[in-house]
Image: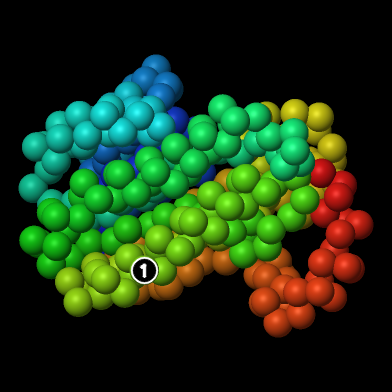
């Protein structure tokens, strides 16, 4: 397992912090060459210097706003010109804003869909021809347990992650004949800066603080799965059990869970 990523080319969006930066570090440690994409170029350059100095791998960084499809086209043209192969694409960029549906701002609705859904699809569509031609590869889409369990105050965010799961499931079937793996990652709440935007009042973080996932744990699970045919990574396991219960007994789940989920 330790040698599986050696000399492989891995692209990670949203790589300037959180699980994106953690994944980059783990991949570099295992000998992979990286293309790191994010809006904050300064942070990417700091990460590049640190990882290249420590692990002696090749790292390219590009500033990219995933909500801008023209920018995606431009940046990925440069990336693909540099790489002979693309072994793994991790669509990690994403954000959420927790508000009740009647309070959701149109700009936030458009923003979340632009980044979480359209941007993810655009990045994927641009690397697929190369993966199909080479007859191998792995697309990893960071979705969410919110894509399985819709909860109050996350109607828009949950809708984007439902869309990601639908896209991922279809993509998996389309690409199987080309020997390309497709994995959905569905984490619960993670201790990252995500909630600085998503949870302005801090009430949700207070209510779930006791079982928030550590970013290094999530990142390791994802990196361990790279270039293996794993269908989904669901974290934590008990929350995934809840999503299964939700599918089987939605009325009971909503009645019991409403009081807890309303803590957002």
Q: Residue at x 51, y 32 (%)?
A: 111
Q: Residue 244's spot in the image, x, y percent?
A: 67, 77
Q: Residue 59's spot in the image, x, y percent?
A: 25, 34
Report crowding for label 1: few under 14, some 14 to 19, many 20 or more residues within 10 A (C-alpha): few
109 or 122: which is nearer to us?
109
Q: Residue at x 21, y 50 (%)?
A: 127
Above-or-below relation of 247 to 136: below
| Quadrant for the N terminus in the image | bottom left
257 or 134: which is nearer to us?
257
Element under disc 1 = helix
98 sits to left or right of 84: right
Q: Residue at x 67, y 76 (%)?
A: 247
- What residue does disc 1 label? 170
Q: Residue 46 occupies which quadrant of the picture? A: top left
Q: Residue at x 45, y 38 (%)?
A: 115
Residue 29 in view: no
Q: Residue 119 occupies which quadrant of the picture? A: top left
């Amino acid at each position: 397992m330790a040698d599986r990523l050696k000399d492989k080319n891995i692209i990670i969006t949203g790589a300037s912090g959180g699980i994106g930066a953690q994944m980059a570090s783990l991949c570099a440690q295992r000998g992979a060459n990286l293309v790191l994409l994010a809006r904050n170029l300064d942070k990417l350059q700091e990460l590049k210097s640190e990882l290249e100095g420590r692990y002696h791998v090749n790292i390219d960084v590009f500033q990219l706003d995933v909500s801008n499809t023209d920018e995606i086209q431009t940046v990925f043209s440069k990336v693909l010109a540099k790489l002979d192969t693309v072994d793994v694409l991790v669509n990690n960029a994403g954000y959420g804003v927790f508000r009740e549906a009647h309070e959701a701002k149109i700009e936030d609705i458009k923003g979340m869909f632009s980044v979480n859904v359209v941007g993810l699809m655009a990045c994927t569509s641009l690397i697929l021809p190369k993966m199909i031609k080479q007859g191998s590869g792995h697309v990893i889409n960071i979705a969410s347990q919110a894509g399985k369990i819709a909860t109050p105050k996350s109607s828009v965010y949950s809708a984007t992650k439902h869309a990601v799961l639908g896209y991922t499931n279809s993509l998996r079937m389309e690409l199987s004949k080309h020997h390309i793996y497709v994995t959905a990652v569905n984490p619960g709440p993670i201790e990252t800066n995500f909630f600085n935007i998503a949870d302005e009042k801090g009430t949700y973080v207070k209510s779930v603080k006791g079982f928030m996932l550590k970013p290094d744990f999530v990142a390791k699970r994802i990196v361990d799965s790279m270039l293996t045919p794993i269908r989904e990574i669901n974290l934590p396991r008990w929350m995934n059990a809840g999503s299964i219960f939700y599918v089987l007994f939605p009325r009971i789940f909503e009645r019991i869970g409403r009081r807890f989920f309303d803590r957002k």
